[in-house]
Image (cartoon, rainbow, N blue to C red):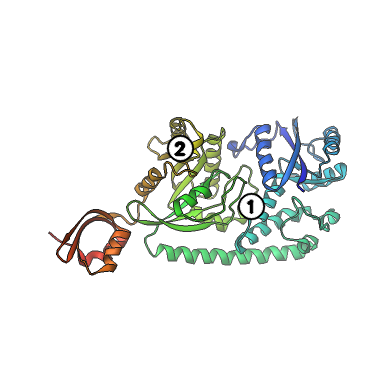
Amino acid sequence: MSEIVILAGAHLRKQKDSSNPLTELSVEESLNELHALAESAGAQVAGRLTQTREQADRTTLIGAGKVAELLAFAEGVNAHTVIFDGELTPTQQRNLERELGRKVVDRTQLILDLFAARARTREGKLQVELAQLNYLMPRLAGRGVMMTRQGGGIGTRGPGETQLESDRRKINGRIKNIKQDLSKVRSGRGIQRKQRQSVPLETVALVGYTNAGKSTLFNRLTNAAVLADAKMFATLDPTVRHIVLPSKRKILLSDTVGFIRRLPTTLVESFRATLEEVVEAKLLLHVVDASSPHATSYVEHVHHVLKEIGAEGTRQILVLNKADLVKDASEQVAQGRRVLQDANAEVIAVSAWDGSGIEKLLAAMDREMQMDPVEWMRLRIPASEGGPLHLVHERTKVLSKQEVDEWVEFEVEVPASVRGRLVQFELIS
């Protein structure tokens, strides 16, 4: 049976994030996003309550009168949990749980719960546990009753009862151990990256707002089987596959976790190792849901996150996905260029679902590649040399082919990384 929840949001006129104006959402839009997050966590949303205030109430965020209204609402729909659209202080959360007699979860805890449910690799699980323990540390005092509960539901998945009942010293010890383990993961990634860089293979990373269709596009480009569904954060752990571009150059394509507004700081810090895949990429495919009414603001938000992690200078192709749901994508393309503030920027409309626009996207990726340049060659290979002939067809773009006696002559465009393996057959005229 689904957990019945109520969503609660407060618009605070005096509370604005001046460092990031792009994260501003109307209360209604933000609650719509929270609704999607809650459903992705398996909840049944029974309703929502909003309030406009000058500033937050220090004890309950929304004030005593609104708490009483929220209690009556929760009792009327038999809600088990109240989810607040924002981060509550430990004091606010304790007071609200006492007044409402129900579990109270904030936006940060909900996102952490989703990440805990999605993590599959050891690295992903460690990252989530680190973020959850950092979130729980200031909330340990006065919450012994809640910490010892064994019940399930939103906000209870993660490091487990042992960690939740531990004192601060033990939790700090666990945090230290996790950071050491993640340091080893980061070192391992560095070694893997150096090995990849020892051959001329550029890395292209998919980035974008959560649920933009990155994993579906990744599957379309690589013929992989990465989980792709409509739930937010369906893909958490990064996946890397190689693909061959129209020029026959090979590149590595990395699928990464989706971004979201007000992504908890604990998560950004914990997922540094994963985000390194984005930072180290030579090209970003910035995927946006072209059918969303908030597409422009999503693009702006992703730009802000890229700046936070030091990847704002990386070349981008703006990929307007789900073009099959848009009658005319020309306006979206024009808007995309305006957002990127570059009339020459590559903006490609595609549908990862039906494959339309994929050839244009691959051609655009080919144009953006700087490493492993393509060269023209004439080749003359004995017809009995199966290996080199296979290499020509597999790794070069054949412009012409002619069979002469026991020889096969080609005109090809060949990546520099492959040229050395064919230079012995080069025909110098």
Labelled disc at residue 190: none
x then y, percent, for residue 89: 76, 45
Point out the tag, 1 or 2, that comes first from the N-terminus: 1
Labelled disc at residue 340: 2
Q: CA distance from mark 1 to mark 2?
A: 27 Å
Q: In the shown orientation, is residue 425 left or right of residue 48?
A: left
Residue at 39% in and 34% down: 343
Residue at 61% in and 38% down: 23
x then y, percent, for residue 128: 66, 57
Labelled disc at residue 267: 1
Q: Decide which of 306, 81 is in the foreground and name it.
A: 81
Please determine whether, in this image, residue 193 is positioned above or below residue 234. Answer: below
Label 2 neighbour load within 10 Å: few <14, some 14-19, many 20+ = some
Q: In the shown orientation, is residue 136 left or right of residue 331?
A: right
Secondary structure at badge 1 equals helix
The residue type indicated by label 2 comes to Leu
x then y, percent, for residue 134: 70, 56
Secondary structure at badge 2 equals helix
Q: In the shown orientation, is residue 260 left or right of residue 410?
A: right
Please determine whether, in this image, residue 291 is positioned above or below residue 113. Answer: above
The residue type indicated by label 1 comes to Leu
Total labels: the figure holds 2
Q: In the orientation shown, which residue stands out farthest toward the bottom?
A: 384
Q: In the orientation shown, which residue stands out farthest toward the left?
A: 429
x then y, percent, for residue 194: 44, 65
Quadrant the C terminus occupies: bottom left
